[in-house]
Image (spheres, helix red, strand yellow):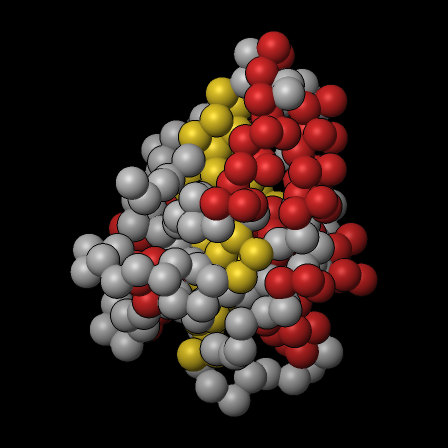
């Protein structure tokens, strides 16, 4: 089956699934039927990954790059550019959003999208498929309007819910300046609509999800919001729910 766009990443283990990949796929609008989302682990053979990608005969391949998969993704990108140089390779993710000039993986790829790419990736693909190439290799833009982002929760499959860690978030950004953390560079904190978020959580619970991992950098930054979320889950605690948060004392 031919797909113009491949969204791929290498997770550290099978139990992890890519939240970022699902965001990009969810916001591809009319291009979504032309895209395929594929996840591997860092233990997969690079050549097998390349063969799988090329079996779709894609025009664009996007990789999510993180601290745990940079080396392995670089191997895949290097092979892919050698055997299929006509395929456009674009990178995104935290590991390529701040140091883009010197990293070998960035030099090997065709383009790098910095920061939150919910809408930037769609625009990039639309332009490439329409015959317009970006003027710059490094692509960046304003933070997306969080109220217009399509949430990806319906993209969690039954298999994800049963056997994998499912990620959720009610906010993005962090106001703190911890030197060891990349999140300190994202100083603008924005929150998703709480009522919509809780409705999405209710739908996930109805599908059987019992373990929720919040990726909010500071879950209790807003006591009012975090209290409402905790109350929501407390009312359903009889379902043996497990919640994971990052909090400040």
Residue 213: x, y in percent? 48, 33
**Residue 147 visible within the image:** yes
Residue 137 lies left or right of residue 241; in this view the side is left
Which residue is depicted at the point 80% across and 62% down?
Answer: 30
Is 136 drawn above or below residue 191 in the view shown?
below
Between 12 and 247, the residue placed more toward the observer is 247
Residue 176: x, y in percent? 30, 60
Between 183 and 64, the residue placed more toward the observer is 183
Which residue is depicted at the point 43% across and 79% down?
Answer: 138
Residue 109 lies left or right of residue 28; in this view the side is left
Between 92 and 71, the residue placed more toward the observer is 92
Residue 224: x, y in percent? 54, 45
Is 200 drawn above or below residue 191 in the view shown?
above
Quarter of image, res 64: bottom left
Which residue is depicted at the point 73% across and 37% down?
Answer: 199
For the N terminus, which image quadrant?
A: top right
Which residue is depicted at the point 58% across and 36% down?
Answer: 229
Seen from this angle, which residue lies furthest front? 224
Is 151 drawn above or below residue 229 in the view shown?
below
């Amino acid at each position: 089956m031919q797909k113009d766009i491949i969204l791929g990443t290498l997770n550290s283990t099978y139990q992890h699934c890519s939240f970022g990949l699902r965001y990009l796929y969810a916001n591809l609008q009319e291009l979504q039927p032309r895209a395929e989302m594929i996840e591997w682990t860092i233990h997969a053979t690079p050549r097998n990954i390349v063969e799988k990608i090329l079996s779709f005969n894609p025009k664009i391949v996007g990789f999510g790059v993180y601290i745990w998969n940079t080396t392995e993704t670089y191997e895949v990108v290097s092979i892919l550019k050698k055997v299929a140089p006509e395929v456009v390779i674009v990178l995104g993710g935290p590991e390529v959003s701040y140091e883009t000039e010197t990293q070998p993986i960035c030099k090997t790829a065709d383009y790098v999208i910095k920061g939150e790419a919910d809408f930037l990736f769609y625009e990039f693909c639309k332009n490439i498929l329409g015959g317009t190439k970006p003027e710059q290799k490094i692509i960046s833009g304003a933070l997306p309007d969080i109220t217009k982002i399509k949430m990806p929760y319906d993209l969690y499959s039954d298999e994800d819910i049963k056997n994998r860690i499912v990620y959720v978030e009610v906010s993005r950004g962090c106001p703190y300046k911890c030197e060891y953390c990349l999140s300190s560079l994202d100083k603008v904190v924005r929150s998703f609509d709480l009522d919509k978020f809780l409705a999405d959580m209710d739908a996930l619970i109805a599908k059987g999800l019992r373990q929720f991992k919040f990726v909010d950098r500071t879950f209790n930054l807003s006591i009012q919001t975090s209290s409402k979320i905790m109350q929501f889950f407390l009312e359903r605690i009889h379902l043996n729910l497990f919640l994971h948060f990052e909090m400040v004392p």
